[in-house]
Image (cartoon, rainbow, N blue to C red):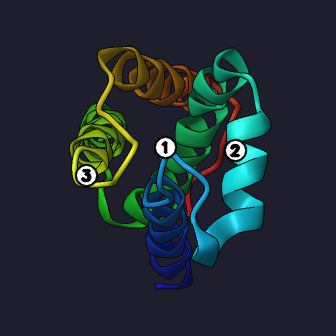
Amino acid sequence: MVNLLLTLGYMAGIYWLSSIPGEAATENELLSSIILWTPPAIQNLAHIPLFGVLAWLWYLPLSAWIKNDRLLFRTTFLLTTGFGIMDELHQLTVPGRYASLTDIALNTLGAGFAVWLISRPGCTTRQ
């Protein structure tokens, strides 16, 4: 249960980050300024580890519930990429932000790489 709460909290953090307007706003001025200062290439590449960690976090609670490895890895991947797509769609509603197919691809890459790593023999142990 703790692992699931950690995963959902991490997802809430990603959602919060994607809720920051594209232009500096008074309520998040410091964080908005930091994000606007960060080069777009770095912002884009950050999607890979961000969603890789999310996939690993999904793996933790799911591994206790799903005993079939193939189903476990597919479910982990689908939940992570599904959230990545939903988060990009959410950005359509945020002033100064937009959805990006590149970001979806990078989210998917991060999730896929993490699932691949997790699935390697000896890389993880079941809960």
The tag earlier along the polypeptide, 3 or 2, is 2
* Secondary structure beneath label 1: helix
In the depicted view, which residue is nearer to us: 94 or 89?
94
Residue 37 image position (x, y, % from top left): 78, 36
Q: Which residue ends up furthest to the bottom in the rendered image? A: 1
Q: Which residue is mark 3?
A: 90
In the depicted view, which residue is nearer to us: 70 or 39?
39
Residue 85 image position (x, y, % from top left): 25, 37
Q: Residue at x 31, y 36 (%)?
A: 81
Q: Amino acid at mark 2?
A: Ile
Q: Quadrant of residue 68?
A: top left
Residue 74 image position (x, y, % from top left): 27, 33
Q: CA distance from mark 1 to mark 2?
A: 24 Å
Q: CA distance from mark 3 to mark 1?
A: 20 Å
Q: Quadrant of residue 52?
A: top right
Q: Nearer the viewer, mark 3 or mark 1?
A: 3
Answer whether labels 3 and 1 touch (C-beta < 8 Å). Answer: no
Q: Amino acid at mark 1?
A: Ala
In the rendered view, would you say 14 is above or below 92? below
The tag earlier along the polypeptide, 1 or 2, is 2
Q: Which residue is mark 1?
A: 55
The tag earlier along the polypeptide, 3 or 1, is 1
